[in-house]
Image (spheres, helix red, strand yellow):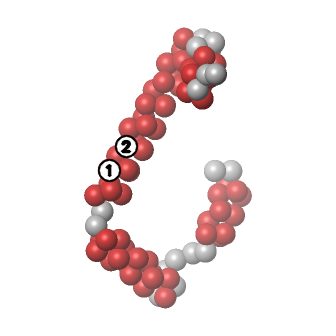
Amino acid sequence: MMTLLEQLLEKASQLPSEEQEALARRWLQELEDELIWEEKFTATSEEAWGKMAARVERAIENGESEPLEALLAFEENEGL
């Protein structure tokens, strides 16, 4: 049985070279971004998470935030 990664690579190998290169660049960039985020999250202390949470709570209390539904509706209407 093929792994999911093997299936992905087999399908990608059927694409023209230009498309393979474009996909590879995009996948590598996404993987690099994921690794950076993982490193940042891992390196963030409990104290720092607490400070960020307090800051968000203050922003909500002060009306400096928007409901997620409003942001999602904006994205839908703007075609994002």
Position of the N terminus by quadrant: top right
Give how far across and how far down residue 78 sits, in percent: 67, 55
| Residue drawn at the location 46% of the way across and 38% of the way down | 30
Disc 2 residue type?
Leu
| Residue drawn at the location 33% of the way across and 56% of the way down | 42
| Residue drawn at the location 33% of the way across and 77% of the way down | 51
For marks 1 and 2, give the CA distance: 6 Å
Please name the residue that numbered disc 1 is placed on.
39
28 w.r.t. 53: above or below: above
Give SS at disc 1.
Answer: helix
Give how far across and how far down residue 65 sits, in percent: 52, 77
Residue placed farthest to the front in the image?
1
Q: Quick check: 6 left or right of 72?
A: left
Give how far across and how far down residue 54 sits, in percent: 38, 81
Disc 1 residue type?
Glu
Q: Quick check: 65 left or right of 14?
A: left
CB atoms of marks 1 and 2 within 8 Å: yes
59 w.r.t. 19: above or below: below
Please name the residue that numbered disc 2 is placed on.
35
Nearest the viewer among 77 and 68 is 68
- Pointer 1: residues within 10 angstroms few (<14), some, or many (20+)? few
Give SS at disc 2.
Answer: helix
62 w.r.t. 38: above or below: below
| Residue drawn at the location 34% of the way across and 46% of the way down | 36
